[in-house]
Amino acid sequence: MTHLRADIPLTIALAKGRLAEQTVGLLQAVGVDCSDLRDPGRKLVFADAAHGYRFILVKPGDVPTYVDHGVADIGVVGKDTLLEENRPLYELLDLGFGACRLCVAGFPGGEGQTGANFRVATKYPNIARGYYAAQGRSIEIIKLSGSVELGPLVGLSDVIVDIVESGGTLRANGLEVLETIGLVSARAVVNVVALKTKGQKIRALIAALAAQLHQ
């Protein structure tokens, strides 16, 4: 990639964990120096000073917040997080990795359940509420942070809304996918103002990443 003006700094927010590792590999492939990120230790801020890039490692759910507030110009995070946060960001590239499904799951035969006390356990209350509202269905949201699969097992909820990769955890607990809300994967999002003020460099980086993905 031809790097544009190191004096125009770009800050990139990366979701800690596997998404950050995969993004670092992709950035390295297009010539961005991410060597310090390979073994971050407890550090949270890194830089490729030669090319004018700075990286911050944050919790996945916080990536849209940092980008929306302009602390980061670009963020890489799952589509599920973007849907849940629903912030005014430009989504410029589907990176393809971290692919999974966002689903309603529960005990077999649980499709189409209704009732005033229909309970949905989830880490994604906004997504779940919007999904059922679009069907004209009233639900009770039970927000969980841990293993939401436990909800139906102990009678806390009728179903769950969660991301599903292989479905192994569901099967191991006697649950199955009842409805698929949508497909999700890692996305590159950009701050609205940054795209105007640093647009040339941002678009050059996004174009390089897209070309690398399609090799």
Image (cartoon, rainbow, N blue to C red):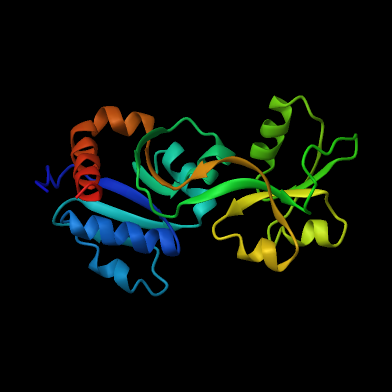
Q: How many marks?
A: 0
How far from the left and from the top, in percent, is residue 18? Answer: 43, 63
How far from the left and from the top, in percent, is residue 197? Answer: 25, 30
How far from the left and from the top, in percent, is residue 214? Answer: 23, 46
Q: Is residue 214 visible?
A: yes
* Residue at far left of view: 2
* Residue at far right of view: 116
Q: Judge by depth and name the residue closer to the eye, 177 or 116.
A: 177
Q: Residue at x 45, y 45 (%)?
A: 66
Q: Is residue 69 visible?
A: no
Q: Judge by depth and name the residue closer to the eye, 213 or 90.
A: 213
- Quarter of the image for residue 84 reads top right
How far from the left and from the top, in percent, is residue 175? Answer: 73, 58
Q: Residue at x 88, y 57 (%)?
A: 155
Report whether 164 appears left or right of 198. Answer: right
Q: Residue at x 65, y 65 (%)?
A: 169
Establish if 46 lies above or below 183. below
Establish if 195 lies above or below 109. above
Q: Judge by depth and name the residue closer to the eye, 164 or 58.
A: 164
Q: Judge by depth and name the residue closer to the eye, 98 or 203.
A: 98
- Quarter of the image for residue 98 reads bottom left
Report whether 188 appears left or right of 212. Answer: right
Establish if 30 lies above or below 66. below
